Amino acid sequence: MHSIDFSKQRLTRLRMALAQTESGMNDLVERTRFERLLEDAGILLDELDAKSERYGEGSHLLELDPFLATRLIYCLDQCEHIFHKKDEPRTKNQLCIDDPERLLYPSLMQTTTRQLLKVILSVRKKRSGDDFGYNQPTFREVLYLKSPASLQPITVCLLKEPKRRWRQCVTQPMLLAAKVIHRMLSYAKTTWENYRFHIRRKRKSRSVWQKMVGLLPPW
Amino acid sequence: MWSFYSRCGSAEDVSTAIAKYRHEVDVVTFDVFDTLLQRRVMDPDWTKIPAAQVVSRILELKSVVVPVRGTLADRLAVEHALRQAAAAEGMDNECHVTDVFKSWLECYFGSEEAAGYVGQLLEEEMRREFSVCEAVPGMLETVREVKSWGKRVLLASDMYLDSAHIADLLNANGYEGSYEALYVSSVHKLTKGTGRLYELMIDEQEFDPTRWIHIGDNRWSDVHSPARLGARTFLFAPKCLSVRRKKARSLKKLCSVSPRWHGAELMEVVALHTGNRAFRSVASEIGYWVLGPIFVNFIHQVIERIQRENIGLLLFPARDGFLLRSIYDRLKPILLSNLNVRTEYVFLNRKSAFAASLNEIGPREIRYGLSSGEPCLRNLVKRFNLNPDDFMDLAREVGIDSLDDPLDVRNVFFDHDNVLLFLRHPRFLDAVRRKSAESRRLLKDYLDQLGFWKTDRVALVDVGWGGTTQDCLTFAFQDDPAWPNVLGLYMSFVPWMPLCRTRRSKYRGVFFEDRRDPVGHAPFASFPELFEIASRAPHPTAEGFRKSDTGDNVVPVLQSTDAQPFLNELNNKSLTLDLQAGIFAFLESYAAVLPFLEHPPGTYGSFFLSQLDRLIRFPSAKEAKCFEDFYHQEDFGVEVLTHHVHHKPNAASWTSWKKFLRTASRTLWKEGFVVGSGYPGLIHIFNLGKALYMKKWS
């Protein structure tokens, strides 16, 4: 089965198949891969052929050069595999951790899971990643792998060191207040800048305060 | 937050926005990075890592060890100082790349020597920029369309690179001839943020700022600054860009908490390189996202190790060695270009080495011989490379009727007197010794062909698990004066019997080693066959050695391709090929990202293990279905056949559940089986139960 002659036959068959189905393989990525593998197989076969002349005809392919021979068999196998499955539809990228369109807003399910996890973890009072269990992914890691974009802020919260927890409790309202003040200031700043740079040219007749009121959001 | 900025979510939006005002404007300007060009890295600072690596390497050649992080920190400090100096001179906070490289290298070398390396660093930096830069989808067409309307197109960028470098990047991505002029902050020492670069542009290009549109991704320098001068501005903020930035920010935070998250960063960058690729099957996806990182990172760690250990010969035992050596061959030119390490794909396995290691028949030999699904005397004799039928008379002589009677492995010495009589019989011992001497001679000649005996330090790289092949080699040849220092590097090292550990035969687990981390083997212990299938070469296993037909060299005796075990394996060929296609595809992405890696490979490994553990302990239904039916045969002849047709037990019927549990107990990958049942949440209960049973719940 693994001889030079048999490999030559396989290669010829695959080349013919490729030539016959010039328009059959519509998938460009797969086609390119197929062609590259076929090219590699050709080069490997030539090398092994040269060796077989040196070592004598009829030698087992793997006895000539085990690694090159294995690569050759692999290339031919892959080509046949691609060719036989060329008409099968390809799957969407399911395991990819990056899917921005889908994960932009957390769904109801994700929110519920997040709340549930928060409760479980607060009951267990375990927040440190390394001490959580034995070297296994924790719930938050599993969660991260499943849906990263929307849940990363939560995982950050859960990763806080336990010792600093009491301090966080004290500073939490202060942080919240600071955040609100920052929001208000940045809003005022943006409004003022917008007034200066965008609107000034449009509404020249009205007073500053009228313009400011006009800029406020509808609520 | 309510905003007045006009946002453009895509290149089409930009086109529409400009078209709306096309009769009111003469000039359209664009920002360059993240508007016309985007980089496939999480953080722009990643592009500075390759140059930092070059500096580290130059210093290493001069016997000064500064890690990449150190040189990178020096560069950032130098950039900061140069910006401060420019501000002190009345210019804006900006510096030029040549000045940065010169001042940076002067931290380590004299001025003349530093000037000599600047060209090399520039070349490296630009090479990497070219490899990661790509045109933002649709923007090329938009720029051409704007030009076709007869508008003047100008570009402005706040960047430390020279304008010629940025022009090269733009030209390489198809923007050649689409713009009139390019203004770069590093050249004029004026930035967009202060608006002085725009003022210079207006003066030099002599256009009316009220008849001008600017598009860019930065709220301040691309929206406010030009608007202050009278331009109509649009913020270019596509969703994918903001998501990527958000991810980069949160991952940075996570990395500061635990370095394992650097692996997640790496995977995100790989995802950027992957793009919207569709996979042939779930198996190739598993190969790409889960197994690829593990195998490739393992070989990356091995390469680091062999550099440190000064290894002369690297052996990749068949059949797992095929995948490992292919990965090694791809990574070696990038990581080990200056080292000359010989590599060999060898037909060494437990079966081919065990017979050579026999001398006496003691507990070790019996344990090896009976480590099978069906421990019996026939299998034991077969493992000694002898024909069981030749010893039927001897068996009858000592009172054994059949060689197929099952034996209790633990109590061979206590419960089976006849077996002991058989094994210690001089006739049997004689045959064993004769066969062993022959096997040892052949094995020695085979190793001689590989140059094993002429090398001082040899490394054996394998997936795992027990290190028994190395143990057999050590047992056979440790007294030989030519025996070299052998270092076994295993992806996961889980020895199941006492091994022959000597000063010249060491065993190391790269991802997991039981002595170092007694409870961390969950990913590898639950489903080790997954790695065996994924790394299996497409040829039969070796059963021993023989002299070649010409008689001048030793060749392996391979299992027949018509043998039932190999035919059974062919049923899983499609699964193996898909997994391997995924792994090799990941290898290409990893090789592209490799120059941007700042940390040692071990840092990324722990995250990859988490991904693997996620797959094994919390598989999705599709992932579980992938492995529902497969055949695996160990080199020693232990056959594992997993076949679990997914069936959903009837919730109300205890009999149905009993049948389900009975099947689950026999199944190799229990998690996959549980998920296959179709009950949501059952896998969580199963994992909780398992953790409690193993008493490893925190």
Image: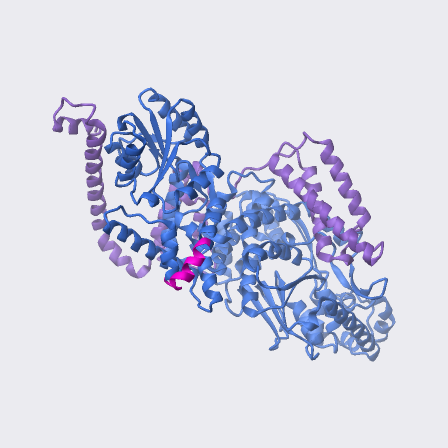
Chain colours: A purple, B blue
In depth, the one of B277 and A12 nearer the eye is: A12
Q: Is residue B691 something that shows in the picture?
A: yes
Q: Eyeballing the image, is B194 above or below B392?
A: above
In the figure, B140 relative to B460: above or below?
A: above
Left-right relation of B231 to A106: left
Could you tell me residue B289's position as x and y percent?
53, 48
The C terminus of chain B is located in which quarter? bottom left
Choose between B609 and B246: the one closer to the eye: B246
Point out residue A85 in the picture as x, y percentages from the top left corner. Answer: 67, 37
Q: Is residue B574 magenta?
A: no
Residue lying furthest front in this view?
Answer: B112
**Residue lying farthest to the top in this orientation:** B23
Q: Quadrant of the N terminus of chain B?
A: top left
What type of secondary structure mainly makes up the magenta span? helix
Q: Position of residue A64 (x, y in %)?
A: 77, 57
Highlighted magenta segment, given as a residue range: B107-119
Residue B292 place in picture, x, y as percent: 56, 51
Query: Within the image, what quadrant is residue B625 found in?
Result: top right
Judge from the rendering whether residue B158 lies leftward or rightward of residue B298; answer left or right: left
Q: Is residue B110 magenta?
A: yes
Q: Residue at x 32, y 59 (%)?
A: A162
